[in-house]
Image (tube, grey):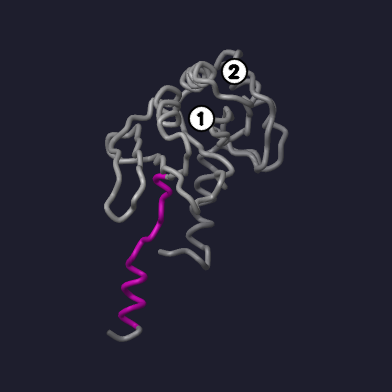
Amino acid sequence: MGPGRARLLMDEINLRPQLCHMGIYTDRQDEMQSFYERVLGLVVSDTGVAHKFKRRIVFMTADPLRHHQFVLVARQEGDPAVSPLFQISFKVNSLQVLREVRRRAVQAGATDFQPMNHGNSWSLYFNDPEGNRVEVYMETPWYVAQPFADDLDLNLSDAQIYQVTEARLGPLDKAMSADAWSVAMAQKIKNSPFALS
């Protein structure tokens, strides 16, 4: 095959990778499994030890179309002593669900709670039993240049949270609707010299 045909095949591929799951090492697999089941409603889809990968793995999901979204891997000698992750993020679809996650996380012993209004999302941060930073968030209908962080009072009503956010973002440069941002970002991706499509 000549170089022209190879280039044509590459041009036909629309490669847009999507981050779909993540795995973390753990020393307390059963406790961590229970925590993520109770707090986020994740369900074990499979668990076991592979013949080539000699350690117990727990596969968890909240999506019936994805075998796993989150994986707990038993830490062994030679693995990192602590998680090198900055945070583990989970998206929810309402402030009501975000409040319920907070209630469950408190009940399950999570620590270091920090609710944040990022303008483009309302987020709740906390630490799981092994100190991994967890973010549970809901997208807002707005975009604002990041990083951006205000306090978030989840005791306010949904309408009040919307009002507070809209008032705060109104005078900011580069604040816009999430839809307008998506259109602009699609163009930026398309025009990128590094685009894989």
Q: x%, y% of residue 140?
A: 54, 31
Q: Is residue 54 left or right of residue 152?
A: left
Residue occupying image coordinates x 28% and y 35%: 45
Which comes sooner in the sequence, label 2 or label 1? 1
Disc 2: which residue: 154
Camera-side residue: 161 or 176? 161
Mark 1 residue type:
Met
Camera-side residue: 137 or 162? 137
Classed neighbour count for the residue bearing mark 2: other residues with Cα under 10 Å, few (<14), some (14–19), many (≥20): some
- Please check the rendered image and state whether residue 103 is part of the magenta-colored stretch, yes or no: no
Q: Is residue 117 above or below residue 17?
A: above
Residue occupying image coordinates x 67% and y 32%: 169
The quadrant where residue 117 appears? top right
- Distance CA(mark 2)–CA(mark 1): 12 Å
Tag on residue 30?
none
Label 2 SS: loop
Residue interval drawn in magenta:
4-21
The quadrant where residue 72 appears? top left
Image quarter where the C terminus lies is bottom left
Disc 1: which residue: 138
Residue occupying image coordinates x 65% and y 43%: 145
